[in-house]
Image: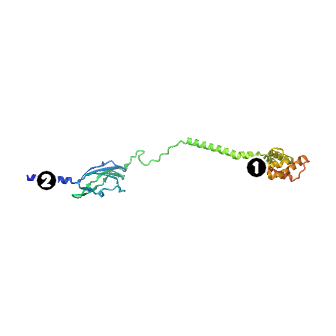
Amino acid sequence: MTQRCALAVALLALGAAQAATLQAVTDEPRAFGHQVGDVVRRRITVEVPDGLVLDETSLPRPGARGTALELRALRKTASAQRLQIELDYQVFLSPAAVRTLELPSLTLRYDGVPRAQELRIDSWPLTVAPLVPVEVSPREGLGELQPDAAPPLIDTRVRAWRLLGGAASLTMLLAYLAVVYLGLPWWGAQRRPFARAWRRVNAQPPLPWRESCRQLHGALNQSAGEVLFEHGVARFTARRAAFAPLEQDIRRFLRLSQREFFEGGMHEPQDAAWLVGFCKRCRDAERGT
């Protein structure tokens, strides 16, 4: 009877000891078929006895760049008697041949009563394959680097027609502006009375004196809008202010013309040169220059 009681007490003590010990269950990713860039996840579930508290510094920290495997994220969910950890690792190695890596082991530390405890999670193998085999098939398209493909041709006919249409429109606009701002003013200037008289008086060989006087009379009469005589010169220059500085020259021409046509054609030799200069001054006054 005494032996049975002792055995029962021992079993109860062993069960209590086991119940006070950390225990873990791991859910590991598959150990094969991985390549560079893949993300794998480990899940660790820890059964935590009462009285124990996790030492947060024992958890791994995301980062550790430059290694074949990088811990990208760590998520932790804790309850009264259970801790669940999810670890995301990304593969950063592209080996030339199949290679086995190790998901690193970790040791979780707990503080509390009746004593502090540690729980080791073993490493886990992870096989990483190359993106392409070292020896590529010699079949066409799989061997050495191929030349660049020719760029696709783009149909530019629509753009060409648009460009031609724009060029034609621009040409017509420029032609219109040239006619309005250059052609018409020039054509109008050439058809003014004194401009036509000047072309005839200044022609070579020179016109006879009487014909030169007739040309200037025609230009004066057309500019004045009437047959101009000496008594109407003041009225003419009052209407056409550009000719006001030439009032005395106009009177002189009318007197010379009077002698030519009605008093026997008397004029001095230098009068011919003066008449050409007078016609030019009238043309300039007509232009406003």
Residue closest to the eye, 206 or 188: 188
The extreme left residue here reads 1
Q: Percent position (x, y) of residue 217?
A: 83, 46
Circles 1 and 2, Cβ within 8 Å, touching? The answer is: no
Count of marks overlaid on the render: 2
Residue 9: image tag = 2
Q: Please indicate whether residue 121 sits to the left or right of residue 137 in the image.
A: left
**Is residue 95 visible in this depiction of the protein?**
no
Dot 2 crowding, Cα within 10 Å, few <14, some 14–19, many 20+: few
Q: Please indicate whether residue 271 sits to the left or right of residue 156 in the image.
A: right
**Is residue 176 visible in this depiction of the protein?**
yes
The extreme right residue here reads 264
Residue 287: image tag = 1
Give the residue displayed 69% in from the left and 47% down from the top: 181
Please tell me whether mark 1 sits on a helix, a strand or a loop: helix
Q: Percent position (x, y) of residue 41?
A: 32, 50
**Figure colour scheme:** rainbow
Q: Percent position (x, y) of residue 199?
A: 79, 47
Which badge, 1 or 2, is on the more N-terminal residue? Answer: 2
Residue closest to the eye, 98 or 174: 174
Q: Is residue 56 above or below residue 220?
A: below
Residue closest to the eye, 87 or 40: 87
* Amino acid at pointer 1: Arg
